[in-house]
Image: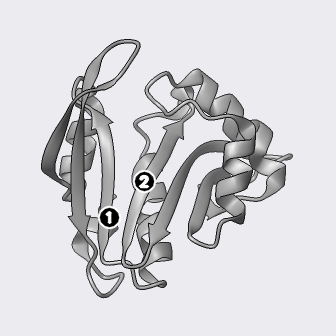
């Protein structure tokens, strides 16, 4: 698996993965292009190496403001989940924003999404606060979690496999 920066050619695959993942934020295709062109935006994709044409297996979208970054969206194709792809995407995103001086990483997740909560906790994210009834269809709380980015990419939290 190769993690690399998003290009416009990846849009169709990224959008298709998003549609297969109801827990992911449901964006319009132009939202990805807008974030990718934003100086504080970053999108990374996980690409299956050796496939011809290359196949995108997952993606993560970030936005940085000064020394803070927010995970805006992440999704892994359901047939490729639980294979370390999300961990690789998150580690690549942390390394990317670290280069720009980001020190604090935030995300929000549905309180009912137990697999995601366990995953984020395994990386070192900690609960900061709850936004009650934040999500709709179905109504659910949002848990805001944060992670302090170490000064170097040698952080054990970003190196787990």
Instruction: Kindly identify which residue carries mark 2.
Output: 71
Q: Vertically, is 97 above or below 43? A: below
- Is the Cβ of the residue at disc 2 closer than 8 Å to that at disc 1? yes
Q: Residue at x 31, y 43 (%)?
A: 108
Q: Tag 1, which secondary structure?
A: strand
Q: Residue at x 56, y 70 (%)?
A: 40
The quarter of the rendered structure image containing the N terminus is bottom right
Where, by quadrant of the figure, is residue 102 drawn? bottom left
Q: Give how far across and how far down residue 47 sits, in percent.
A: 66, 52
Q: Tag 2, which secondary structure?
A: strand
Q: Give how far across and how far down residue 154 sits, in percent.
A: 31, 82
Instruction: Kindly identify which residue carries mark 1.
Output: 105
Label at residue 141: none
Q: Vertically, is 158 above or below 85? A: below
Judge whether residue 45 can be spotted in this image: yes
Q: Residue at x 36, y 81 (%)?
A: 153
């Amino acid at each position: 698996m190769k993690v690399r920066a998003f290009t416009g050619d990846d849009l169709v695959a990224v959008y298709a993965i998003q549609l297969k993942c109801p827990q992911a934020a449901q964006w319009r295709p132009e939202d990805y292009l807008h974030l990718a062109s934003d100086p504080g935006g970053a999108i990374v994709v996980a690409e299956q190496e050796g496939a011809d044409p290359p196949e995108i297996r997952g993606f993560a979208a970030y936005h940085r403001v000064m020394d803070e970054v927010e995970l805006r969206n992440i999704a892994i194709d359901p047939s490729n989940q639980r294979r370390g792809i999300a961990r690789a995407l998150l580690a690549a995103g942390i390394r990317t924003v670290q280069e720009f001086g980001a020190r604090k990483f935030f995300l929000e997740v549905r309180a009912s999404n137990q697999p995601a909560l366990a995953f984020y906790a395994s990386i070192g994210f900690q609960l900061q606060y709850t936004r009650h009834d934040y999500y709709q269809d179905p109504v659910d709380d949002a848990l805001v979690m944060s992670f302090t980015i170490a000064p170097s990419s040698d952080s054990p939290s970003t190196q787990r496999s």
